[in-house]
Image (cartoon, grey):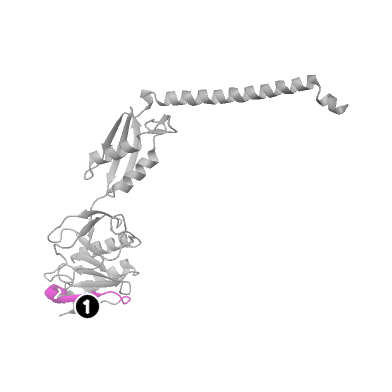
Amino acid sequence: MKRNVLNSPRLLEFKKKRQKIFLNKIFLSLFALLFIFAGLAYISHLEQLNISEVEITGNKVESKEMIETAVKKEITGNYLWFFPKTNIFFYPKDNIEKDLFNQFNRLKSVSLSVENKTLKVSLDERIALYTWCGEMMNSVDGLSKEEKCYFIDEAGYIFAEAPYFSGEVYFKFYGATDSKENTPIGSYFLADIFQKLILFKEALSHMGLKPVVLYKDKEENEDIKIFLSSANTLPNAPEIIFKADSDLEIIAENLQTALTTEPLQSNFKNKYSSLLYIDLRYGNKVYYKFK
């Protein structure tokens, strides 16, 4: 009796109606989603909502044409086959920035904005302040034409190959970088202490010294050498030796005191050409030697 009630024509008809209503709801929902999707796709293609031009500013060395080509490549094509990457609301900003940094190591910052359908790419390039010229100094002449050097910015970042310069145009660094590639470009030189080294170099200049080269030999016990300008070629020029973990401000003060105290004051003035080294590795003491 109970089974007959469950299978009665009236109940079966009710079940069919409910099933039909459910299927209709699914169909209407899918249709609504499709309509919304199509509407959004149509709106996303409207001319006034799409980038039509790319404007590059701030580049001084890097090629404007190459940068523009790289940007246009990133905004070519569609998302999900329907939504253009040129749309001003969802153009691939992060991908553009990442790609530009990967392709152009000279770039320090990239800023993107859209104005009147124009994608404005504002760039800030790294400034070449120093050069890095290898892990080891040339044993005979540190100014050899065979030496390949690279530009370094204020943070110790190596970003481009440098042309050959005769003379002491740029302060030079030698020593291992943190590069894991075959090229030093894109790596840092002594990143943890680089800016302190620059301040120490500048302090030496204020003392009347002329630092031209810094060398850190990874085979030595964290010793760093700064060579001074001299008629002697590297590595036979006068050198200042100190430890990499030294308090550079303190050893600069110690050196300043020594240079204004006899007998070093007179010796340095009269016998500079015969100076071999000044050693700052031993606390507050300053050791030096002339030929």
Seen in the picture, residue 200 relative to 20 is either above or below; the reply is: below
Quarter placement of the N terminus: top right
Q: Residues within 10 Å of mark 1 (few under 14, many from 20)?
A: some
Residue found at x 72% / y 22%: 16
The residue tagged 1 is: 288
Residue 273 is a magenta residue? yes
Q: Is residue 12 left or right of residue 166?
A: right
Check the image and report above or below for 267 versus 200: below
Camera-side residue of 176 and 58: 176
> Which residue lies at the image location 39% right of the left edge and 37% below the top edge?
92
Residue 125: image x %, image y %?
27, 46
Q: Position of residue 224 (x, y in %)?
A: 28, 70
Q: Which residues are magenta?
A: 268-284
Residue 6 against residue 59 in the figure, above or below: above
Image spot of residue 222 (x, y percent): 32, 72
Identify which amino acid the numbered label 1 is placed on. Answer: Tyr
Q: Quadrant of residue 97?
A: top left
| Residue 281 found in image quarter | bottom left
Residue extending farthest to the right is 1
Give percent across and percent down for residue 271: 12, 76
